[in-house]
Image: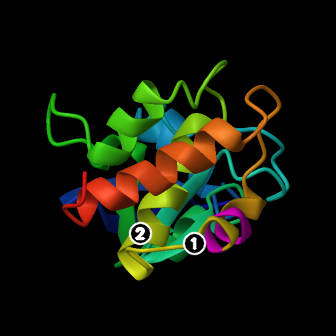
């Protein structure tokens, strides 16, 4: 099969690549674009480890085919920090020890950013509901929820 030529925007910069028609966005990010922050957890869209933003919408990159991103905008975990300066979400995850093995962390950070862009003042219940698609085997979730709510407060200027 012929490869597909794709031009897209990734983290604010144009990216161009060739891919197989059935190649997932996750595979392309990691193998073609060397953006290895996005992790594969399940490969079936059940764990959220591979969460990215596609045209402002949170998606599992293991469920999106690479040709589908032609002409669209992607944001990955690599686009969250400002150079060496961590985003407040990332900083709060560190401060609250809301990570352990790190496989789920990029997906949680991207999902949290999506939540706080949509709802800058979520309740604990709303936060738990929004992040229900992201699974973690290590932390027990409470530290993650505290980190998200603390980051939300800081982003609102309340910290």
Query: Could you say which is closer to the camera, residue 71 or residue 84?
Result: 84
Closer to the N terminus: mark 1 or mark 2? 2
Q: Residue at x 52, y 36 (%)?
A: 30
Q: Nearer the viewer, mark 1 or mark 2?
A: 1
Q: Residue at x 66, y 70 (%)?
A: 130
The residue furthest top is: 101
Q: Residue at x 78, y 46 (%)?
A: 135
Looking at the image, residue 109 lies above or below residue 36? below
Percent across and percent down for residue 87 are: 26, 44
Name the side, left or right, on which 64 lies relative to 138. left
Crowd class of label 2 (few under 14; some 14 to 19; many from 20; radius 10 Å): some
Q: Are marks 1 and 2 in contact (CB under 8 Å)?
A: no
Q: Which residue is mark 1?
A: 123
Percent across and percent down for residue 28 are: 53, 47
Label disc, if present, on residue 116 of the rendered structure: 2
Q: Which residues are magenta?
A: 126-130
Asked whether residue 69 is in view, the answer is yes
Q: Is residue 127 magenta?
A: yes
Percent across and percent down for residue 81 are: 25, 41
Q: Secondary structure at mark 1?
A: loop
Does the magenta stretch mainly form a helix, a strand or a loop?
helix
Query: Could you say which is closer to the camera, residue 60 or residue 113?
Result: 113
The image quadrant of residue 68 is bottom right
């Amino acid at each position: 099969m012929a490869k597909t030529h794709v031009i897209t925007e990734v983290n604010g910069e144009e990216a161009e690549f060739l891919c197989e028609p059935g190649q997932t966005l996750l595979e392309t990010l990691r193998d073609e674009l060397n953006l290895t922050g996005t992790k594969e957890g399940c490969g079936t869209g059940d764990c959220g480890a591979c969460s990215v933003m596609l045209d402002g919408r949170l998606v599992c990159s293991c469920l999106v085919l690479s040709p589908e991103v032609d002409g669209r905008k992607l944001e990955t975990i690599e686009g969250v920090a400002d150079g060496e300066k961590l985003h407040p979400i990332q900083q709060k995850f560190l401060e609250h020890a809301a990570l352990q093995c790190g496989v789920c962390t990029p997906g949680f950070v991207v999902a949290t950013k999506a939540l706080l862009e949509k709802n800058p003042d979520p309740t604990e219940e709303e936060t738990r509901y929004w992040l229900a698609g992201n699974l973690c085997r290590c932390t027990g979730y409470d530290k993650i929820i505290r980190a998200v709510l603390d980051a939300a407060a800081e982003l609102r200027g309340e910290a």
